[in-house]
Image (tube, grey):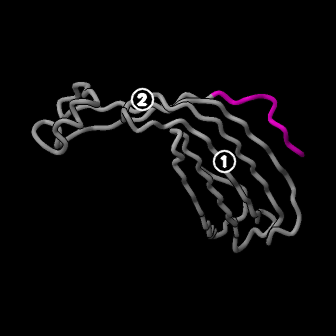
Amino acid sequence: MPSDGTKSAQWNPEPRLGWNKQLPNSINISVLVDVNSDRYTHASDANTDMSYGRFRTQRITGKDGQEFQPFLEYSPRLIFTPFFMQNSATSHNFTVGTDKTYNFDGNWHPVAHAAIRAVPGSGPFRSLQTFGAAIQIPVPPRPRNP
């Protein structure tokens, strides 16, 4: 696709840290912090830095690998001028949702959680397929500056 923009190489370092704690009452708390920089060799006006966080509380009992797992999530995102000198935009996202996993055998037949526990890694379950689905509902309004 043709572009009238300046041709420039880009580099994007992105360190990420995560932490997860399962509490005794089936509540899982997880935290993710991500910091990244976009740098362009011949288009320095496009350089930006960003920090992102995700704080999630989720109910995970561990009794059924296919259970619905409701969660609450808060995700701030901050965009900065290069080298994190000045904040140019901030948004705060609040989400309510649920995660759900579906398991299938090698022939694409649904597999119940009890069957997986009964014969792990044997017979038709050697080629178990797992799919996840998430239903997420953003909680409006989405506070942000500029």
| Circle 1 SS class | strand
Residue that sits furthest to the front in the current view: 24
Q: Specify which label sits upstream in the sequence, 2 or 1.
A: 1
In front of the other: 26 or 113 = 26
| Circle 2 SS class | loop
Residue 144 lies, in percent from the top left, at 85, 42
Span shown in magenta: 137-146
Within-10-Å neighbours for mark 2: few <14, some 14–19, many 20+: some
Is residue 76 positioned above or below 67 on the image?
below
Left or right of residue 62, residue 1 in this image:
right
Q: Residue at x 75, y 68 (%)?
A: 43
Residue 45 lies, in percent from the top left, at 81, 65
Q: Amino acid at mark 1?
A: Phe
Alpha carbon separation for disc pair 2 and 1:
21 Å
Q: Which residue is mark 1?
A: 55
Within-10-Å neighbours for mark 1: few <14, some 14–19, many 20+: some
Is 143 magenta? The answer is yes
Is residue 136 positioned above or below 37 on the image?
above
Q: Amino acid at mark 2?
A: Glu
Q: Give yes or no for contact between labels 2 and 1 (Cβ–Cβ under 8 Å).
A: no
In front of the other: 9 or 123 = 123
In front of the other: 47 or 73 = 73
Q: Which residue is mark 2?
A: 67
